[in-house]
């Protein structure tokens, strides 16, 4: 037993070769188990996460492109709506202008018709008044002449002839458009 007794204490820097062998075998077994079962699962999980992230990014980019296309479409529709609104506004202004012109033309026509009717009524009234004044003036002139001459001009036929002659002379002496005789 001397062999065991003479044993020198192990060197703390150099490991024991049996521990190295056991550690290497355990490491190899652990590596094989990890490589066979754990690493494929980790790789699969990693790929799934990468696919999810990349797919999410691709879906986000696709949705962003779709949103941009919809935004552009809405902008075009808005521009078309604004153009249509401007066209409708212009048509309404043109229609309003046309209606205003029609109303003004009708008002002018009505005004001219009323003025013409008023002028006709005034001319008729004037003619009636002139006729009545001529008759009255003739009667007064005959009465006055009868008083001056001293002869009775009461005879109706004579009176009428004298009045008509006087009125003809009065009409011939008066210039056109004048209100009375000029001397």
Image: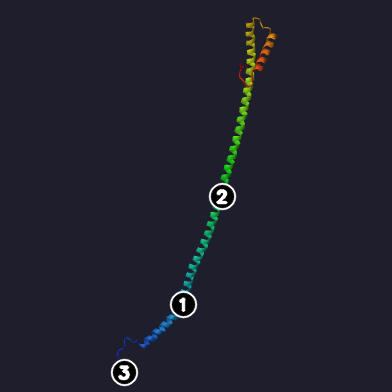
The percent coordinates of residue 57 (x first, y second) are 49, 65
Furthest toward the bottom, the residue is: 2
SS for callout 2: helix
Q: From this view, report whether residue 54 is shown above or below residue 153.
A: below
Q: Quadrant of residue 158?
A: top right
First of labels 2, 3 by sequence position: 3
Q: Which residue is mark 3?
A: 3
Specify whether residue 58 is in view: yes
Quadrant position of the N terminus in the picture:
bottom left
Residue 83: which disc? 2
| Mark closer to the observer (1, 2) | 2
Q: How far is the residue under mark 1 from the one under mark 2?
A: 68 Å
Front-most of residues 156 and 38: 156
Q: Residues within 10 Å of mark 3 (few under 14, many from 20)?
A: few
> How many numbered callouts?
3
Q: Secondary structure at mark 3?
A: helix
Residue carrying label 1: 37
Mark 1 and mark 3 lie on one chain; the one further toward the N terminus is: 3
**Contact? badges 1 and 2 (CB < 8 Å):** no
Compared to residue 111, the image places residue 23 above or below, namely: below
Q: Residue at the location (52% across, 61% down)?
A: 65
What distance separates the C-alpha of mark 1 from that of mark 3?
A: 47 Å
Q: Secondary structure at mark 1?
A: helix
Which residue occupies 39% across, 85% down?
22
At 47% from the left and 74% from the top, the residue drawn is 43
Q: What's the distance in space between the residues labelled 2 and 3, CA to CA?
A: 111 Å
Say if mark 2 contacts mark 3, CB within 8 Å.
Answer: no
Instruction: Indicate which disc residue 78 carries.
Output: none
């Amino acid at each position: 037993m001397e062999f065991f007794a003479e044993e020198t204490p192990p060197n703390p820097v150099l490991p024991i070769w049996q521990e190295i062998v056991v550690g290497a075998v355990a490491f190899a077994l652990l590596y094989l188990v990890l490589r066979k079962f754990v690493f494929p699962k980790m790789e699969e999980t990693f790929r799934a996460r990468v696919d999810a992230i990349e797919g999410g990014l691709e879906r986000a980019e696709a949705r962003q492109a779709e949103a941009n296309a919809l935004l552009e479409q809405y902008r075009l529709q808005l521009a078309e709506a604004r153009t249509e609104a401007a066209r409708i506004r212009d048509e309404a202004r043109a229609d309003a202008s046309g209606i205003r012109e029609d109303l003004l033309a009708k008002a002018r026509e009505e005004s001219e018709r009323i003025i013409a009717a008023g002028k006709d009524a005034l001319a008729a009234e004037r003619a009636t008044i002139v006729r009545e004044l001529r008759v009255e003036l003739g009667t007064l002139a005959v009465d006055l002449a009868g008083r001056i001459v001293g002869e009775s001009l009461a005879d109706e036929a004579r009176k009428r002839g004298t009045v008509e002659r006087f009125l003809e002379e009065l009409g011939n002496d008066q210039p056109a458009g004048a209100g009375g005789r000029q001397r």
